[in-house]
Amino acid sequence: MKIQQSAEDYLEAMLMLEEEHGYIRSIDIARHLGVTKPSVSYAVKRLKESGYINMEANGPITLAPPGRKIATRIYERHKALTAFLEILGVDADQAEEDACKIEHVISHDTYVAICKFVNANSDVNIVNYEDE
């Protein structure tokens, strides 16, 4: 299932907000991603049409199973890549920023190798990285 990087970013942000607050609101997505509310409205509409999210008029946003699957995959990649970069000595903030960029373009084989390295060299335990 291939979707655009921006859609992956929105879905990942939604999952992060859901974990942090217990709900997902458009205004929170805009703040989290540093985009405008009209941009979020457009993205939410497209994600809903594609079956990745559910949302009633002016209601909270929820991740549909396909959207949750993508969001979880991207967020797990983000966490693994952040841990990897921090092991290498990259500053935590820079590691977060770089992981956001890398998570979308890295090959599966390289990602698996990084997960194995992180698992062997830190107290972070990355699971389910081989079945994407």
Image (spheres, grey):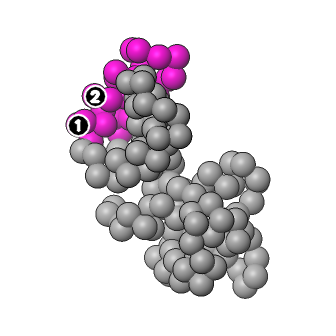
Provide residue 77's location: percent of width, then percent of height: 42, 42
Quadrant of the rendered image containing residue 31: bottom right
The range drawn in magenta is: 108-131
Give above or below for 44 relative to 10: below
- Name the residue rendered at 70%, 71% in the picture: 27
| Residue position for label 2 | 113
Relative horizontal placement of residue 115, taking residue 38 as reference (left or right): left
Q: Which residue is mark 1?
A: 109
Say which of 32 and 51 sits in front: 32
Q: Amino acid at mark 2?
A: Ala
**Helix, strand, or loop for circle 1?**
helix
Residues marked 1 and 2 touching at CB (< 8 Å): yes
Image quadrant containing the N terminus: bottom left
Q: Is residue 78 visible?
A: no
Q: Is residue 13 magenta?
A: no
Three-letter amino acid code at the position of disc 1: Asp
- The residue that appears at 45% across and 56% down in the rendered structure is 70
- Asked whether, in this view, residue 6 is left or right of residue 65, the answer is left
Examine the rendered structure and indicate whether residue 57 appears above or below residue 32: below
Residue 61 is marked as: none
Q: What secondary structure is marked by label 2? A: helix
Binning the other alpha carbons within 10 Å of mark 2 as few (below 14), some (14 to 19) or many (20 upward) gives few
Is residue 121 rendered magenta in the image? yes
